[in-house]
Each structure stands twice: as C-alpha cells, then as structure tokens.
Amino acid sequence: MSRRNKNSDKRKDADKAELEARMRKQAELRAERERRKQTETANKAERERIKREREKARLERAAVKQKEYEARAALRAERLKARKRFYAKLKSKLENKPYGFDYSGYGVLPRVELEVDGDITSVTVKLASGGVDVRDVRRADGKTRFKIRKKDLRKGIAILNQMCYNYRISATYGIGRKCLFWLARAGLFVGIAASIACLNISYGYVWRIDVSGNDKLSVAAIESALSGAGFGSGCKKREIDVDRIVATLGDMDGVADASCEIVGTTLYVRVLESKDYTVHGKCSAYTAGYDAKVTRIVMRSGTATVKRGDVVKRGDTLASGDVYSTAGELLYTTECDAEIYGDVSLAFSIDVSSVAVEYVRTGRAKTKTVFELFGMRMGKAVSPFDSYETVAHTANYDVLLPLYATRYDFYETEPREIERDIDELAKEFAASKLEETEFIGDFECSYNITPTAAGLYSVHLFLSGETLISRGVSEMSQQ
C-alpha cells in the first residue's frame, strides 16, 4: 500500500509541475502579446507623424512646382516673341532669292529658268509686251539667262520661236520644287525620326505596374485603389505624384506603409501590411467549421442563427443574410458578413518514420536564359537532369521596350536517407496545426508518440481553445 501511495504522490507532483509549467508558459505568451500590442501602438503613432510630415513636404513641393511653372510660362512667352522677331528678320533676308519672297506675291509659285542666244534687251522687251513676267535677267558667256513663271512657259517659248532665237530650259525653282526635292530623298530620315519620336513618347508613360510585399491584400485591390486615384497603366510619368500614391495606399485598410518608384516604363509599388489586418468577405451565409461551443458573435450584416453558449456541430448554420422584423417577419435578404468564435477541442493523428529521403545537390549545374518581349518567349527552360532544383532570376530591361531576361539555374540532386528526431517531427506537426487552427487567446496543446512498427511511429495531437469557427458559403453551395 505504501508503494502505491508513493507512486500516486509522484504522479500528482509530476502533474502539478506540468500544470505550473503550462501556466508559466501561458503567462509568458500573454506578456509577449501585451508587448507586441504596445509596440504596434507606438509604430502606428510614428507612422501618423511621418504621414503628417510627408503631407507638409508635399504641399511645400507643390508650391515650388507652381512657381517653377509660372517661371517656365514667362520664359515661353519671351521665347515666342524672340521667334517672331527672328522670323521677320529671316523673311527680310530671303528677299531677292530664287525661291524667296521677291516675286510680287508669286515667290511661292514655281519659276522656270531659260537660257537664250540673243540680245538681252530685245528678248526682255518682247516677252514683257507679251504679258510674260521676266525676273533675274543676267548676261553670261554670250547667253541671256532669266526666269519666268511656270504657267507662262508655253507663251514664252512661242515668242522665242517667232524671234527665231535658240533657247534651252535649264532648271525649275520655287518652294514647292524644293519641298518635292527634299521629300523624295527624306523618306528614310522621316521614318527614323518618327520611330525615335514614338519611343520617346512611349518612354514618357507608365505601361506596367509591379506590386510586391502584399500577402493578404490582392494585387487587383491595390491596382483598383491606384486607378481610382488616377494612376494606372498608360498614365504620364509627369502626372504621377509619388507622395500622393503613398498617401492613397496608406489610407487603405491593412496597409501600414508603402513606397513606390518609377524605373523605365514600370511603376514599382511596395506595401507593408498591418500584422493585425483581417480580410473580411461577404457571403450568403456562414456555417460552423468545427464542433464547438459559441463564445463570441460579431455581426456586420445579416442575422445570427445562434447565440452565445450554444453548442454547434460542424456544418450547422451560424448566420445568414435574412433580416427579420421585431415581429419575426422576413424583411429582406442581403449579403452576410460575420465572425463567430467558439471553444473547440480537436484531435489529430499522423504516422511518421524515423528515416526520410532527402535530395541533396551533386555539384553538377546547368544555366539557361529565356527572353520575353511583348509577351513572346524566346528560348526554352528545360532541365538536362532527371532530378533537380531550379533557381530563377529575372532582370527587367524595359527602359524603352518591355524586355525581360530570366536566368534558370538547374542543380542536379540525388536521394539520400537521413535519420530524423521523432520528437521534433511531432513538434513541427503540432506547430503546423496550431497555425492552421489560429487560436485566439489561451489554448492547450499536448501530444503523445506511440511506436507502431520498426521505424514507424504514430503522433496523436490534442488541441483546445477559442478560435474562429464560422466559414462563409455561397447560395449555390447551400443548395
């Protein structure tokens, strides 16, 4: 009897020590949560201060930009006056030129130069009497040269034939002629200039938005917020205000801080999510995900079908979108948004082995590079090894064109057997289930290990505590 009493006392002492250790651990967890909460409050106050300073700096920069804009407007007006003075001076300098403004209103019209063997006086008098306007008359090498309007060419030739003078048509002048001359030879240069202009214009826009740092928030939600503020694909770079983008993202639920920069034609946005942010979704109803006892009910829209203290089974309806009057009549049905918590007790089992196969690198490696331009891939990333690990690195060269180069490093691996600690495996299994269950506040966790065969063990895990038990369902899944 004394031996039994001693064994019983030992078990009681062991249970008491285990209980005291568990209570100390829970107290440490509560203290750690309190410290985290205080740190988060201090960080939030610091972010608010930084946000106010950024807003003040943004207003100061806006005032400076306004002054610069007014100075540039005054400079443009002064340059416009200078150009007008230059054009007036140029027009005066172009007078008495073959294609200038000296032909009494006909300077922009084409002229034809004739070369005649004959007396200069008789030729000019005869043509003038026939109504042909003669310009730039000169004598050189025994020949008379002059210019007439192109539309008077037939009349001039007929007069020269009557005078029996030999003549020769040498050249055609005029602004139109000059334009045709240069257009016939400048097609290639115009194409090159147009291509360069298109590239420069394209470089002045943002064609791609790259979002990183988000885990709970979706890329679509962040891009929608940016689009609502006027920043999206196809936006001009000069219209993008970095401070305004940061302020827009900072006002989103779940964003603690944000930053952005423009590289080439890509807007890179990086966000820092709040640790305590929870994504709320609206469903037609909520059902229980566990067998539990209801402890808390948070209703944002809809009606709860259970109350605190009720015991529910997995799959039971906890809340719906039906809204009732005080008399119990159904008024309307809307989307339901709720969070319902409860105390749960869960048991999990897993079979593990003390021997595992691990793949290690042999030292052989192969590298391949794939290019992507306008969504088209050039090259294939195919591994030459049967068993391998892959590491990919992507470089962005979209300064003017959306060009990406991805380098794939393939490392050959081979299987090897390794010994594993069963207790460590059990702890890893418990940690994964704790993370999956997401207990709120204090919880209890215990496990035991039972050998089943040579090198095989069964791990039995027991968890209990308060957690979110509501699961959203759609109308179709309810049906």
Image: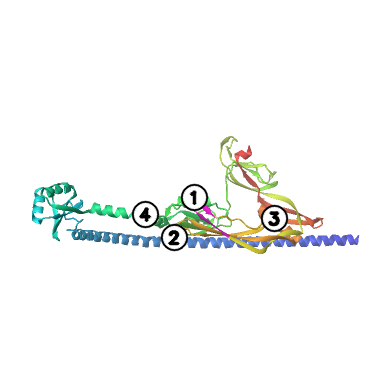
The residue carrying mark 3 is 443
Label 4 and label 1: CA atoms lie apart by 38 Å
> Which residue carries the number 4 mark?
191
Q: Is residue 415 left or right of residue 154?
A: right
Q: Mark 3 belongs to which amino acid?
A: Phe
Q: Please say which color scheme the image uses.
A: rainbow
Q: Residues within 10 Å of mark 1 (few under 14, many from 20)?
A: some
In the rendered structure, which disc, 1 or 3, sits on the residue that comes first in sequence? 1
Residue at numbered disc 1? 224
Q: Kindly tell me whether residue 267 is visible in this rendering.
A: yes
Q: CA distance from mark 4 to mark 2?
A: 46 Å
The Cα atoms of the two marked residues, 1 and 3, are separated by 39 Å
Callouts 4 and 1 close, C-beta under 8 Å: no
Query: Which label sits in the foreground, 4 or 1?
Result: 4
Front label number (1 vs 3): 1
Q: Pick whichever of labels 4 and 3 is earlier in the sequence.
A: 4
